[in-house]
């Protein structure tokens, strides 16, 4: 369980601080690392939260069209895992 607190901090920092500071690429890099680590240690909810944050960044970048398409399957996967709140957030993001 020691991985979760360490992995949670990088989710919040990239989304709020790095992106706000105009460093979306750095935020993206950190989030990709969080997704990998969460997957490795079996922290599914953390993995999905980090992935959602990545899509949020991608929607504000040149990757918008790709992110919208990927959000469809992401939303379905989140629902299948029982992560309904994340699925709803993905649906809202896709609609923006």
Image: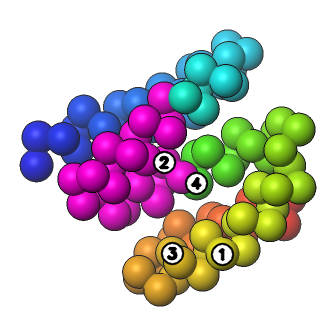
* 3D distance between C-alphas at marks 4 and 1: 12 Å
* 3D distance between C-alphas at marks 4 and 2: 5 Å
Residue 87, disc: none
Relative to 16, does residue 32 appear above or below in the rendering?
Answer: below
Residue 78, disc: 3
Q: Residues within 10 Å of mark 2 (few under 14, many from 20)?
A: many
In the image, residue 4 lies at what x, y percent? 22, 44
Instruction: Tell me the element at label 4.
Output: helix
* 3D distance between C-alphas at marks 3 and 2: 12 Å
Q: Main secondary structure of the magenta part?
A: helix
In the image, residue 14 lies at what x, y percent? 54, 28
* 3D distance between C-alphas at marks 3 and 1: 9 Å
- Can residue 15 be seen at all in this image of the molecule? yes
Q: Are marks 3 and 1 in contact (CB under 8 Å)?
A: no
> Is residue 45 one of those drawn in magenta?
yes
Q: Which residue is mark 1?
A: 73
The residue lying at 54 percent from left, 52 percent from top is 51
Q: Which residue is mark 2?
A: 50
Relative to 56, does residue 70 appear above or below in the rendering?
Answer: below
Q: Which residue is mark 4?
A: 52
The residue lying at 68 percent from left, 17 percent from top is 23
Segment colored magenta: 30-51
Q: Quick one: quadrant of the C terminus?
A: bottom right
Mark 1 vs mark 2: which is more N-terminal?
A: 2
Mark 3 vs mark 1: which is more N-terminal?
A: 1
């Amino acid at each position: 369980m020691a991985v979760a607190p360490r992995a949670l901090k990088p989710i919040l920092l990239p989304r709020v601080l790095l992106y706000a500071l105009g460093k979306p690429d750095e935020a993206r890099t950190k989030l990709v690392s969080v997704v990998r680590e969460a997957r490795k240690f079996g922290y599914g909810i953390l993995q999905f939260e980090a992935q959602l944050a990545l899509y949020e960044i991608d929607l504000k970048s040149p990757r918008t069209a790709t992110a919208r398409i990927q959000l469809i399957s992401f939303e379905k996967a989140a629902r299948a895992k029982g992560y309904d709140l994340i699925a709803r957030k993905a649906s809202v993001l896709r609609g923006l």
